[in-house]
Image (cartoon, rainbow, N blue to C red):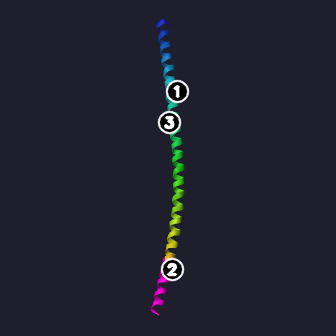
Amino acid sequence: MSIRELQKAVKERNQALQERDQAILERGDIQKALNNQVSKISQLTTERDNLKSKSEELSKSKGEIETRAGKLQSELNSIKKSTEYTSIQ
């Protein structure tokens, strides 16, 4: 090989090494971004599960309150009728 060919080969090798190093850096950046996304997804999943649980609890409480309100309304109507009956006598 001539000197020029050797210089060209060395230059190409150095360029390939730089490109490899750049690719390694980019891969690290991409991995960090991916890890951040995974962490964010995990956090949002936990929040969603907590909200879902809270929603179910609130729905159950609402049903219990509606049942209690119905019973109290019945009691009130019963009391009104009994007081009207005693007022008439």
Q: Amino acid at mark 1?
A: Ile
Of tags 1 and 2, the one toward the viewer is 2
Residue at image location 51% in from the left, 37% down from the top: 34
Precedes in sequence: disc 1 or disc 2? 1
Q: Residue at x 49, y 86 (%)?
A: 82
What is the spatial separation of the Cα atoms under label 1 and label 2, in whole angstroms? 76 Å
Q: Disc 1 marks which residue? A: 24
As drawn, the label of residue 75 is: 2
Q: Which residue is mark 3?
A: 33
Secondary element at image label 3: helix
Picture residue at 49% right of the left edge, 20% below the top: 18
Asked if the residues shown at circle 1 and circle 2 are in contact, with their CB atoms under 8 angstroms apart, the answer is: no
Is disc 2 surrounded by few (<14), some (14 to 19) or many (20+) residues within 10 Å? few
Q: Which residues are magenta?
A: 73-89
Label 3, label 2: how far apart the Cα atoms are = 62 Å
The one of 8 and 22 positioned closer to us in this rendering: 22
Which one is closest to the eye, mark 1 or mark 3?
3
Mark 3 surroundings within 10 Å by alpha-carbon count, few (fewer than 14), some (14 through 19), many (20 or more): few
Three-letter amino acid code at the position of disc 2: Glu
* CA–CA distance in space, label 1 to label 3: 14 Å
As shown in the figure, which amino acid type bears the numbered disc 3?
Ala
Q: Nearer the viewer, residue 55 or 6?
A: 55
- 6, above or below 22, in the image: above
Say what secondary structure mark 2 lies in.
helix
State the predominant SS element of the stretch in magenta: helix
Secondary structure at badge 1 equals helix
